[in-house]
Image: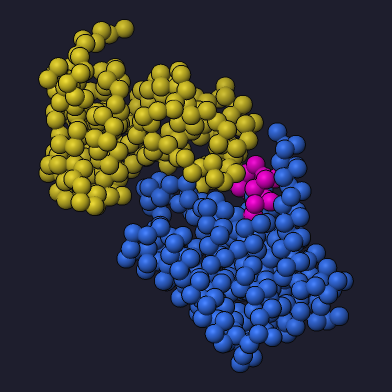
Amino acid sequence: MAEIILKVENLNVKLGKEEIIKDLSFEVKKGDILTILGPNGAGKTVLLKTLLGILPYQGEIKWRKEVKIGYVPQRLPFIKDSPMSIEDFFRLKGISTKEETKKALNSVGFEENSAFFQKGEIGNLSSGQFQRILVVWALIGNPNVLLFDEPTTGIDIGGEETIYGLLAKLKKERDLTILLVTHDLSVVYKFSNYVICLNKCPICQGFPKEVLNTETLQKIYGEEVKFYEHHKH
Amino acid sequence: MEQFLLSLIAGIFIGGVAGYLGTLMLSRKMSLVAGPLGHLTLPGIALALLYGFDVSLGAFPFVILGILLIWLFEIRTKLPIEALTAIVFASGVAIAFLFLPIEKAETALVGDISKIGFLDTLITCILSIFLFLLIKKIYFKITLINISEDLAKTEGINVKKYNLLYLFSIAIIVALGVKIVGGLLTAALVAIPAATARNLSRNLLQFSLGGAFWGVLSSFLGILLFKITGFPAGPLIIIVSTFFFLISLIFKRILP
């Protein structure tokens, strides 16, 4: 039995007067890949931010003591407001030399991509490349839990495929526990072993194959969604 | 000659730090804030000119008041911050003109660095160095906060504390800035060198030091031009600064 690293009980989150998350309880065990599934505006990102301790809440959030969290935000639109090289971005996390930055990038399999450095400003990277940079950035300091917020739009084609490949690889190498937000069903099936379905109120949770059915999916996404059986490739 | 040297030194120090801080303000889209705050200091400058004490000293409490008021209004109402700044700064200008002697109006509005004394210059330099070191210390943290407050918070950065230090830096630079460019032109002192540096830089170091460099150079040449032409130094510094900005636009198009 794997140890429990996060226990959430009766979580309620209000932003202003609006109730975003109602009465949510769940547990995360070491090594889990937990997906938080739901449509836009369902409160997924809010849940991640609450778990990070950024937003006020009612109820209980208990992280195990030795937990160290890395956070990959959805996107960082304001990064284009300063001229920033990749090296600068890593400097914000306390990494001060080009060698160290390279090492950090290498450690997640970026060695063939040294062209990354010649691109100049980080704002010029493609969304997919930038997302990988965000993952590397989050992993500096060796966190054992990764909170990953999937961008809803704007990742270049092929990007989504590789980011989950990268996450799977990292999980194996670093013994990570991953909590990830997504609206993409295929990610849930391929990648995770536990799913929480949210549409403000918690709709269902459990092993993806067991809890995701026509009824629950209609509750999440509305009537028009048809369920299709996922086939393993 | 000695008087001119003092003006030059004070101008260079203030210009440099203003340009440096300006890069942080530009990244946060706050370049213009120094403007309203500068206008708000006019009653303080008027008092200083009336009673013969240092204009920065007169300006400082009013900047602090301005920052507090804007901050309070922001919490208390749902009006956009720019409307609030407009209310605050317009009141400042209005109040100043109730008692500002008209013959001192030019000094109050566009500054006068030409009569700065030795002690005043010394204090200006010390404050500028202190401010430079403070900004250097908070630069990366503020940059991360500019990019994403959430990310900064998860990195354990005390966002409120750093924002306060940042606002405090703006307050000091406005108070120092009114010495050379008066209550009207403080925004230009932080905004233009930073904008020039932004056009010519591709990383943070080039950007931040670029802001300081263009600030120093503009003040230096502006005050030199004042010596030659006799026009007031404040507007000359800003005009030189704008000239560099225009040149940077050409280079921006050439840079890949």
Image-quadrant location for residue B55: bottom right
Q: Is residue B2 visible?
A: yes
* Left or right, residue B143 beside residue A47: right
Q: Position of residue B194 (x, y in %)?
A: 64, 54
Residue at 26% from the left image edge and 45% from the top image edge: A50
Magenta stretch mostly in which secondary structure? Answer: helix
* Left or right, residue B119 beside residue A32: right
Residue B184 among those drawn in magenta: no
- Observer-nearest of B120 and A175: B120
Residue at 61% from the left image edge and 92% from the top image edge: B51
Q: Position of residue B110 (x, y in %)?
A: 68, 73
In the rendered structure, the colour chosen for chain B is blue
* Left or right, residue A57 beside residue B126: left
Q: Is residue A207 visible?
A: no
Q: Position of residue B135 (x, y in %)?
A: 56, 62
Quadrant (top left, top right, bottom left, bottom right) of the N terminus of chain A: top left
Q: Is residue A109 above or below residue B146?
A: above
In the rendered structure, the colour chosen for chain A is yellow
Image-quadrant location for residue B31: bottom right
Q: Is residue A164 above or below residue B194?
A: above
Residue at 76% from the left image edge and 60% from the top image edge: B240
Quadrant (top left, top right, bottom left, bottom right) of the C terminus of chain A: top left
- Observer-nearest of A117 and B179: B179
Residue B200 among those drawn in magenta: yes
Residue at 54% from the left image edge and 85% from the top image edge: B98
Q: Position of residue A173 (x, y in %)?
A: 38, 26
Farthest-out residue, bottom: B51
Q: Which residues are magenta?
A: B194-205
Q: How many marks?
A: 0
